[in-house]
Amino acid sequence: MGALEDLLQTVAALRAPETGCPWDIEQDHQSIAECLVDECCELLQTIDRLDMDHMEEELGDVLLQVVMHAQMAKEAGHFDFETVCREINDKLVRRHPHVFGQENLDTSEAVLVQWDQIKAAERKRGPEQIGTFKDLPRQLPALMFAKDVFKQIQKQSMPAGELIDLAAIDALSDTLDEATVGKQLFEIAAACRSKGIDPESALRRYAQKLVDTLEST
């Protein structure tokens, strides 16, 4: 914990009102939110390239964002880095009874089913109820958002036949590979540019329309 404790103390010093860095002192959760997005994107680039030398650096940059937000929350009396770590550790133990308990699960599929069951039970006991499509972050890139929307439709066997041609999707998936998908998505993006259409906005609006329609039925 030596290096981590050093990082926590460094960030606290940067935020110290009288002796810290003027820029760091001025920041709040909202003002540095975009920094987290940027750092995650840079980390993803190193992962795509399996660039281990730079991955180490980018993981540190992402960790810095977590520590900064935790420090701000600590200053406001909400929580701190230790409680963040405790919360995620408790969640991991709670949702892996096949590792930390007596259950036996032999496949990844069974693990995912159990994870969803435990997660659903936790939310039923919680103070807030969420919609059918959970709390999908609207900040997700449109492709990720659309994929998660369809995942929920599949998992919950929702009657979306009038909105989505499931048979056509199944038939299309049988013929797809990564290279074909990349080519087709690029061609769609290029055609959208020629037509003056923002493909990101178009996909996001359509996926959100599905969410709104299915949750209202």
Image: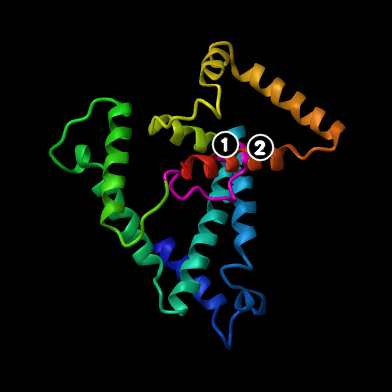
Q: Which mark is residue 203?
A: 2
Q: Nearer the viewer, residue 197 or 112?
A: 197
Visible in this render: residue 81?
Answer: yes
In primary-sequence order, the first of circles 2 and 1 is 1
- Residue sitting at 50 percent across and 75 percent down? 12
Residue 156: x and y, percent? 38, 34
Badge 2: residue crowd in 10 Å (few <14, some 14–19, many ≥20): some
Q: Which residue is mark 1?
A: 146
| Left or right: 99, with 188 as reference point | left
| Left or right: 215, with 26 as reference point | left
Number of numbered discs visible in the structure rendering: 2
What is the spatial separation of the Cα atoms under label 2 and label 1, in whole angstroms? 7 Å
Tags 2 and 1 in contact by the CB under 8 Å rule?
Answer: yes
- Residue sitting at 66 percent across and 16 percent down? 180
Residue 14: x and y, percent? 57, 76
Check the image and report above or below for 131 versus 51.
below
| Left or right: 85, with 64 as reference point | left
Q: Secondary structure at mark 2?
A: helix
The residue type indicated by label 2 comes to Leu
The kind of secondary structure the magenta stretch mainly shows is loop
Picture quarter containing residue 49?
A: top right
Q: Nearer the viewer, residue 173 or 59?
A: 173
Q: From which residue to which does the magenta span run? A: 132-145
